[in-house]
């Protein structure tokens, strides 16, 4: 199972994956404070039942660290807040705070804290169903612990990675990493970690239906939990052993173990373990074909789950409300501080402005006197300049008139040239059509030795209707006669094709339909279809003239 701040934290992950026991959050809150006793002080009692109060205490310490510019302590408290939100099921907030802590540790070069935070962040990513990001965080933490030969960190990180591979249904990799975790945990004599690793190995073998091996590792985990008096882990392991007996058909012994876990959970008031034990008993009775008993226990489990859900929901709501209230107060304080700074700035600025006004008044008086003396000379110069400018304007107007006359002449020439060019294309295409008809007539003859060459010649003539170089020259001249026409048209109707633009240009020139069909190398029916499709593309209303619209464009769309 995944490891977190300490090996005891991993019991939460095992419980969530094995029993869906989200309630081990209470247990985690107790064990978390053992790792941060110096930082959190008296927050472990509040964290058990009042995570919102724990958040307030940590937030006070965080604000103090920020005011003292203690970046490392700031990162620690951000990490603690992130873990607090994680164990309340608020994964998004948890990731946000852990990323803030990670950034601080990275900037401060606190590599040990950074590696630990990567393990925590990877755990939250995993339960937020971001497995790839989780594996990335665990891998980076593993690299650090390998470099520094930190066996405790290696044990936790190997176990985390092994758990991911177990859930990805890669038992060989999962077993390999859990064995590496076991080796490093033995080196550190960390009994709590060994307990969880044995339980993880048992889970792997249980998933593979290798129940003898699973029973062996669960039994080893149970002995270690007894040695450390870890009653929460004992309840969980007894439930797992009960699963083994139930899955191997030994229902009576499995039922005894589940009942033992039930009694222990009732004594410890561990609602989550109690719910898991009730579910296991219900499963056993169902397999023993005692549906009434199975139904009774499953109903008790469901009632207990609803109760747990309600309590946890209230805690989450209280924590989120506390977060909102604290952020609102921080915002109000920031606004007040900003208002104070703004008031100081306003006072200083007012004083400066008044001083500047006095100085400016004296300067204006002196400049006004000088201005009066200079105005007469300036007026005389302005009159001379006005006269000169007037003469220049008259000359410029005459030049513009000449330019307009020249442009008008050039436009008329271009129009004639465009018309002549169009007629040339019509004549050429007519000749090609006649030639094509003659060739088709020859193809109908029985002289088969000439058919291949004549057919190729007919195909070349067909291609000449569509790939005629005259269209490039036609486009150039058309743009000179009607500047910006095509650019405005394609901007207004971007779906128009090159064929559509050719048809529009010919319509703009008032070419007849017969000549347009000849120029485009299509039949009259194909031309009518092309005109119909063009009307659709430009969304022309029924009854409105296509030629009239094109003649008025672009004024027709304004």
Image (cartoon, grey):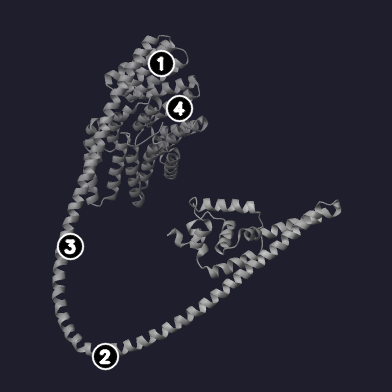
Q: Does the rendering let one see residue 253?
A: no
Reading the chain from its start, which is encountered first: label 2 or label 3? 3
Where is residue 274 shown, x and y percent of the image? 32, 20
Mark 1 vs mark 3, foreground winner is 3
Where is residue 148 shown, x and y percent of the image? 42, 44
User: In 3D space, how far apart are the residues under numbered discs 4 and 2 (Cα atoms)?
Assistant: 104 Å
Relative placement, left or right, of 191 versus 462 is: left
User: In 3D space, how far apart are the residues under numbered discs 1 and 4 (Cα atoms)?
Assistant: 24 Å
Residue, x 33% and y 19% (percent of image)?
Answer: 301
Residue placed most toward the observer, 414 or 117: 414
User: In 3D space, how far apart are the residues under numbered discs 2 and 3 (Cα atoms)?
Assistant: 48 Å
Where is residue 162 shown, x and y percent of the image? 46, 33
State the SS at label 1. Answer: helix
Where is residue 506 shown, x and y percent of the image? 58, 62
Crowding near pointer 1: few (<14 within 10 Å), some, many (20+)? many
Q: Which residue is mark 3?
A: 345
Residue 380: numbered disc: 2
Mark 1 vs mark 2, foreground winner is 2
Classify the position of the N terminus by image quarter. Answer: top left
Q: Which residue is mark 4?
A: 201
Residue 283: numbered disc: 1
Crowding near pointer 3: few (<14 within 10 Å), some, many (20+)? few
């Amino acid at each position: 199972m995944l490891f977190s701040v300490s090996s005891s934290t991993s019991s939460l992950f095992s419980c969530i994956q094995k029993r869906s026991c989200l309630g081990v959050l209470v247990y985690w809150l107790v064990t978390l404070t053992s790792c941060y006793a110096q930082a959190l002080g008296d927050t472990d009692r509040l964290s058990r039942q009042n995570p919102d109060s724990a958040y307030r205490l940590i937030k006070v310490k965080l604000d103090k660290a920020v005011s003292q510019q203690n970046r490392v302590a700031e990162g620690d408290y951000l990490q603690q807040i992130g873990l607090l939100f994680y164990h309340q099921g608020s994964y998004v907030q948890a990731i946000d705070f852990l990323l803030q802590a990670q950034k601080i540790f990275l900037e401060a070069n606190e590599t040990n804290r950074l590696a630990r935070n990567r393990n925590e962040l990877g755990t939250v990513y995993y339960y937020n169903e971001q497995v790839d990001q989780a594996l990335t965080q665990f891998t980076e933490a593993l690299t650090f612990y390998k470099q520094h030969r930190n066996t405790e960190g290696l044990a936790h990180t190997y176990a985390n990675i092994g758990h991911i591979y177990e859930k990805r249904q890669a038992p060989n990799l999962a077993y390999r990493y859990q064995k590496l975790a076991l080796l490093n945990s033995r080196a550190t004599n960390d009994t709590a970690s060994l307990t969880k690793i044995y339980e993880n190995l048992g889970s792997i073998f249980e998933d593979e239906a290798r129940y003898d091996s699973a029973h062996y590792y669960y039994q080893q985990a149970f002995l270690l939990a007894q040695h450390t008096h870890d009653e929460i882990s004992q309840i969980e392991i007894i439930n797992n052993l009960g699963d083994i007996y139930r899955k191997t058909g030994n229902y009576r012994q499995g039922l005894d173990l589940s009942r033992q876990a039930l009694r222990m959970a009732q004594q410890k008031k561990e609602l989550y373990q109690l719910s898991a034990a009730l579910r296991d008993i219900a499963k056993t009775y169902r397999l023993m074909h005692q549906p009434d008993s199975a139904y009774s226990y499953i109903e008790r489990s469901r009632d207990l789950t609803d109760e747990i859900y309600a309590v946890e929901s209230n805690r989450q709501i209280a924590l989120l409300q506390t977060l909102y209230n604290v952020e609102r107060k921080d915002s109000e304080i920031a606004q007040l501080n900003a208002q104070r700074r703004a008031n100081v700035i306003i006072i200083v600025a007012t004083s400066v402005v008044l001083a500047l006004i006095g100085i400016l008044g004296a300067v204006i008086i002196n400049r006004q006197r000088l201005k009066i003396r200079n105005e007469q000379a300036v007026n005389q110069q302005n009159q001379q300049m006005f006269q000169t400018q007037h003469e220049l304007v008259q000359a410029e107007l005459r030049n513009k008139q000449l330019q307009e006359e020249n442009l008008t002449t050039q436009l008329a020439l271009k129009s004639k040239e465009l018309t002549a060019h169009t007629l040339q294309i019509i004549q050429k295409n007519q000749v090609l059509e006649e030639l094509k008809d003659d060739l088709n007539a020859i193809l109908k003859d029985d002289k088969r030795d000439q058919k291949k060459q004549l057919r190729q010649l007919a195909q070349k003539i067909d291609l000449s209707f569509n790939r005629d170089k005259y269209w490039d020259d036609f486009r150039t001249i058309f743009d000179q006669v009607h500047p910006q026409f095509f650019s405005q048209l394609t901007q207004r109707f971007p779906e128009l094709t090159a064929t559509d633009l050719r048809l529009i240009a010919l319509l703009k020139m008032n070419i007849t339909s017969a000549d347009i069909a000849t120029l485009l190398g299509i039949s009259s029916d194909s031309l009518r279809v092309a005109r119909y499709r063009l009307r659709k593309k430009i969304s022309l209303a029924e009854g409105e003239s296509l030629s009239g619209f094109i003649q008025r464009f672009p004024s027709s769309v304004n």
